[in-house]
Image: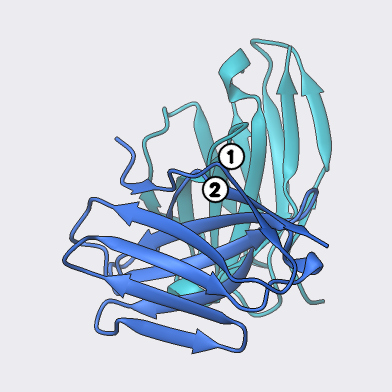
């Protein structure tokens, strides 16, 4: 049962344009959502997060939007840069659950075209 | 020492064998979580250790076991290896099991079972 879904395995975007990565979840108990970026031969690195009490969180070029009623979140990257080319994972969890495990989506490979 | 280090980086084992993977947590982090990332999938939670005790387990059989040591380094042991155990194994350390955004991942061990 895939509780976190990223339906686009890959995405190509021109440098300087906006990249939008999408994620859907099914478990209404999730109250914290994160985006991780992963380069080959490296572990995932934390990018940005959002609590379920918010609908938007912004950090520089990265903005995450959360629509709880639709159980949907998205990551916007503006402007996209060549260094943004990587695999992006959406992850979700329940804060304060005692063991803070993350449930990941299958990832979206983002390619920025110069 | 900063960051999370995992060893070995690559490993090839034969079906039925046993394997031990090692993780050295980020300095000061007393919680370690292990994840399995199969090809084309997102990381899946195996288990978490907090102060040398198992503190939550995902949907993995008992032949997956772990240890955490007083210096917060840890091991993942897998017995009776199966071909489907071929994956990237990631460990992540955190302080007191959270917050969810506080995980630091290692670069992983790529296990191939033949």
**Foreground of the two, A19 or A74:** A19
Left or right of A6 in this view: B86? right
Residue at position x 58%, y 64% in the image: A36
Label 1 crowding class (10 Å Cα cut-off): few <14, some 14-19, many 20+? many
Against A48, residue A36 (above or below) is above
Does the rendering let one see residue A101?
no
Residue matched to label 2: A107
Compared to B49, does A107 lie above or below? above
Q: Chain A's shade in the image?
A: blue
Instruction: Tell me, by letter, which chain the rendering colours cyan.
Output: B
- Badge 2: residue crowd in 10 Å (few <14, some 14–19, many ≥20): many
Q: Which residue is mark 1?
A: B37
Image position, residue A10 (x, y; %): 60, 45
Q: Secondary structure at mark 1?
A: strand
Kindly tell me whether residue A11 is visible in this rendering.
yes
Give the colour scheme shown: by chain
Same chain for mark 2 and mark 1? The answer is no
Q: Is residue B82 left or right of residue B111?
A: left
The residue located at (39%, 78%) in the rendering is A50
CA–CA distance between discs 2 and 1?
11 Å
Tag of residue B68: none
**Whole-percent x, y for residue B83 in the image:** 62, 14
Instruction: Quadrant for the C terminus of chain B, please.
Output: top right
Using the image, name the chain to which the residue with label 1 belongs: B
- Image quarter where the N terminus of chain B lies is bottom right
Task: Look at the picture and state if B40 lies above or below B55.
Answer: above
Using the image, determine if residue A7 lies above or below residue A28: above
Q: Nearer the viewer, mark 2 or mark 1?
A: 2
């Amino acid at each position: 049962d895939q509780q976190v879904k990223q339906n686009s395995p890959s995405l190509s975007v021109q440098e300087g344009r906006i990249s939008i990565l999408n994620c859907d979840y099914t478990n209404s108990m999730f109250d914290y959502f994160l985006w991780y970026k992963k380069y080959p031969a490296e572990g995932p690195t934390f990018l940005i997060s959002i609590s379920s009490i918010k609908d938007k969180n912004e950090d520089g070029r990265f903005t995450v939007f959360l629509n709880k009623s639709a159980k949907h979140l998205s990551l916007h990257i503006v402007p996209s840069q060549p260094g943004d080319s990587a695999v992006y994972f959406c992850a979700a969890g329940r804060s304060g659950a005692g063991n803070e495990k993350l449930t990941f989506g299958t990832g979206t490979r983002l390619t920025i075209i110069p | 020492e900063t960051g999370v280090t995992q060893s070995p980086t690559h490993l090839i084992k034969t079906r039925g064998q046993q394997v031990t993977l090692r993780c050295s947590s980020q300095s000061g982090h007393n919680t370690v979580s292990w994840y399995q990332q199969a090809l084309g999938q997102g990381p899946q939670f195996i288990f978490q250790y907090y102060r040398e005790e198992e503190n939550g387990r995902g949907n993995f059989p008992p032949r997956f076991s772990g240890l955490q040591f007083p210096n917060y380094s840890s091991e993942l042991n897998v017995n009776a290896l199966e071909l489907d155990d071929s994956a990237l194994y990631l460990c992540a350390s955190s302080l007191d099991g959270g917050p969810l955004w506080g995980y630091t991942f290692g670069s992983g061990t790529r296990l191939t079972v033949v």
